[in-house]
């Protein structure tokens, strides 16, 4: 049985249902909205598994689900390329992972400016400029590629935009869609501060066990969805 991890609630779940449904794969919950089991009407050998978006990368890597729908930001932050395969970008759940700085930093417009500000900050204060984020891997890779060194990452588990106002960080790197929360907290995105443009993606696990029956069901599903799976 192919297990497909899908978002467990909200707009992402409905958008996921709509994307599959538009291609003839009709998913639904098997009971009320509080039940975490479901069915796929008219398609044997497949069952949806309702998980939070953050749980889906973990379950894909562990091989406990065969397919999963979750944001590309979460997968690229937590998994290696040999653990999953991208099958399709779904066109919803778009959000950007960006670097934002206080509006009062009028001379900091680019990542290169941030590098200079970070060096000056360390010289003035004796410690490195702090950037609050949940995305340590993606942010570190981005800043390293741009030659930024004098900084430290501060882990943020929520309300990242408030860390600057609260004095626990000098800048942030976070997901945003409209930018309203950034503006409300007097922050702005660097002109070249886009780290990752995220959206919902259908992923295939490279670590899950695929029986002959699973392979056959996946072949039928791939044909209906118009996707191609390279790993076997």
Image: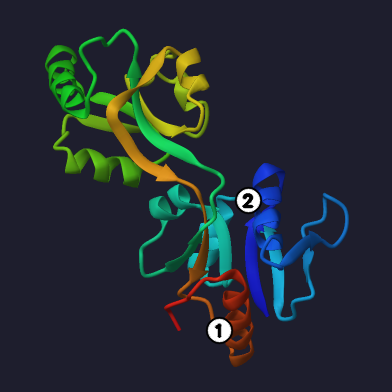
Q: Secondary structure at mark 2?
A: loop
Residue 205 in the figure: left or right of residue 127: right
Image point (75%, 80%), residue name: 44
> Residue 198: x, y in percent?
45, 45
The residue lying at 61 percent from left, 84 percent from top is 214
The residue to which callout 2 is attached is: 52
Q: Quadrant of the N terminus?
A: bottom right
Which image quadrant is residue 163 in?
top left
Q: How is the rendered protein coloured?
A: rainbow
Q: Residue at x 25, y 9 (%)?
A: 106
Q: Is residue 31 left or right of residue 95?
A: right
Q: Earlier in the sequence, mark 2 or mark 1?
A: 2
Disc 2 from disc 1: Cα separation: 23 Å
Left/right of residue 34 with respect to residue 206 in the rendered view: right
Residue located beneath label 1 in the image: 210
Residue 90 image offset from top left, x and y in percent: 54, 55
């Amino acid at each position: 049985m192919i297990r497909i991890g899908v978002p467990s609630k909200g707009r992402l779940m409905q958008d996921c249902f709509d994307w599959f449904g538009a291609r003839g794969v009709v998913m639904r919950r098997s009971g009320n909205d509080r039940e975490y089991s479901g069915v796929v009407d008219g398609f044997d050998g497949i069952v949806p598994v309702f998980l939070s978006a953050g749980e889906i990368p973990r379950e894909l890597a562990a091989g406990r689900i065969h397919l999963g729908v979750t944001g590309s930001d979460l997968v690229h932050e937590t998994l290696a390329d040999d653990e999953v395969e991208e099958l399709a970008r779904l066109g919803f759940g778009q959000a950007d992972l960006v670097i934002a700085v206080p509006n009062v930093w009028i001379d900091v417009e680019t990542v290169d400016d941030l590098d200079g500000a970070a060096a000056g900050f360390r010289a003035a204060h004796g410690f490195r400029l702090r950037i609050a984020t949940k995305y340590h891997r993606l942010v570190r890779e981005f800043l390293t590629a741009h030659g930024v060194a004098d900084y430290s990452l501060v882990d943020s588990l929520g309300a990242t935009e408030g860390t600057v106002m609260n004095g626990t960080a000098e800048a942030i790197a976070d997901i945003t869609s409209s930018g309203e929360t950034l503006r409300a907290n007097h922050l702005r995105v660097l002109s070249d501060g886009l780290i990752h443009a995220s959206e919902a993606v259908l992923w295939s696990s490279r670590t899950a066990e695929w029986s002959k029956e699973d392979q056959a069901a996946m072949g039928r599903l791939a044909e209906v969805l118009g996707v191609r799976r390279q790993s076997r």
